[in-house]
Amino acid sequence: MIEPVTIDLDPAGESILIRNGHDFRDTGHLGFDWRAEDEGEPLAQGPLAVPVLRPGEHTLLPWPALPPAKDGERAFTVTARLARDEPWAGAGHDIAWGQAVSPPAPPPVRRRAPLSRQGADVLVGPGRFDAATGGLRAVGGLPLDRPVLDLWRAPTDNDRLGGREADGWQALGLHRLTTRLTGLDASGDALTVTTRVAAAGTDAAMHTTYRWRTDGSTLWLDLTVVPEGDWPGALPRIGLRTALPGWIDTVDWYGRGPGEAYRDTAAAARLGRHRHTVDALQTPYVRPQENGNRHQVRWARLTGAGGGLLVTGDPWYDLTARRWTAAELAAARHTTDLVPGDRVHLHLDAAHHGIGTASCGPGPLPEHELRARRTTLRLGFAPLDRPQA
């Protein structure tokens, strides 16, 4: 497919390549603008003077002068929009965009605070853990379900058709994993918990190590997942699942958005700061299925009347938040079957299997297949105060 306009940004040369892909129309009906953001915060913006390009013509322009970059990540975006109303869309409608993202500065070296004990609990900064199991109970005053490794997702139509990968996931028993505690050490400045997570229909397993530490204000997790045995085919996901109180109703995040995006469906997802309610994060497909993932999230604030939780990625993670479990989503046949419960179910993923097009074409491309492999995920958790009345 030939795009009507393409915009390619070269950070190294600070150049903007704009190409008119129309066969018979010039670009006189378009206006161009640019904006720069540091860590999602607007820095500068303005119109971009682009000469009218004949069909198939291109031009190379310099970036506008920008202030020096700070330590954080900078995104530079150029957008082509309709300059006037057209029969099919109004003035201002986005036609094309390009975005260049500078690499963030290395994370600061964080000081480490020691653990402490309080009755049957181990305290790691704002984190409260069960001393017997190593399970996280709360962050600050916010209770949550113990984060555990998850490898399954509610199958999409594409998962069910074509190569019928969902049948293999069901046969392996990925929807009913069993977890066994294999080690627990609370000493010095780290709480280390090891588990063996096995699928119900196979001898294969995942050895997981949760290493919890704190800098005093944030609870940091280094999760390492190492496969054991033969894991045939692709895995749906590798990540953590937990749940928060049902009064959590809003998600602000810095990452790709504003709509849902997976590793092979992210072309329309721009890096920036976005906001949705938990309900608005859902994509109401006619047949309920996995949906609503936000890709490459740097941080997310999940908030409500009682406060909330800040989840930071180092460097990022994939996020879904919904009012029903993956099992309830998989069992539903119509959107009316999805009844909100008293929890917000949260997935924080290191990786997802691609979506592909198996319902009408091929499955995910090889580079978007998720195979069992050593995986690491680094996350930070910090409580957020109750909003002031």
Image: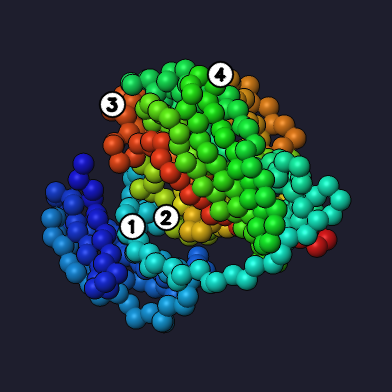
Residue 252, horizontal then vertical, whole percent: 60, 55
Q: Is residue 87 left or right of residue 316?
A: left
Q: Earlier in the sequence, mark 4 or mark 2?
A: 2
Quarter that holds the N terminus: top left
- Mark in the foreground, 1 or 2: 2
Give amino acid for label 2: Arg
Question: Residue sitting at 52 percent across and 38 percent down?
Answer: 207
* Quadrant of the drawing holding the C terminus: bottom right
Crowding around mark 2 (Cα neighbors within 10 Å: few <14, some 14 to 19, many 20+) is many
Which comes before the other along the chain, label 3 or label 1? 1
| SS assignment at label 4 | loop
Residue 246: percent from left, percent from top: 74, 40
Amino acid carrying label 1: it is: Trp
Q: Amino acid at mark 4?
A: Arg
Q: Residue at x 51, y 50 (%)?
A: 377
* Percent x, y of residue 293: 50, 42
Q: Quadrant of the rendered structure where residue 19 is? A: bottom left
In the rendered view, does 301 fall on the left or right side of 109?
A: right
Position of 186 with respect to 238 (left or right) is right
Of the image marks 2 and 3, the number of the one nearer the N terminus: 2
Labels 3 and 4: the sequence-earlier one: 4
Q: Is residue 133 above or below residue 98?
A: above
Task: Calculate the distance from the C-alpha at mark 3 to the C-alpha at mark 4.
Answer: 23 Å
Residue 4 visible at all? yes
Answer whether labels 3 and 1 touch (C-beta < 8 Å). no
User: What's the residue at 32%, 54% (across, down)?
Assistant: 96
Of marks 4 and 1, the one in the foreground: 4
Q: Residue 318 got which mark?
A: none
- Which residue in the structure is indicated by mark 3? 361
Front residue of this view, candidates 171 and 67:
171
Q: Name the residue carrying label 1.
A: 97
Which label sits on residue 270? 2
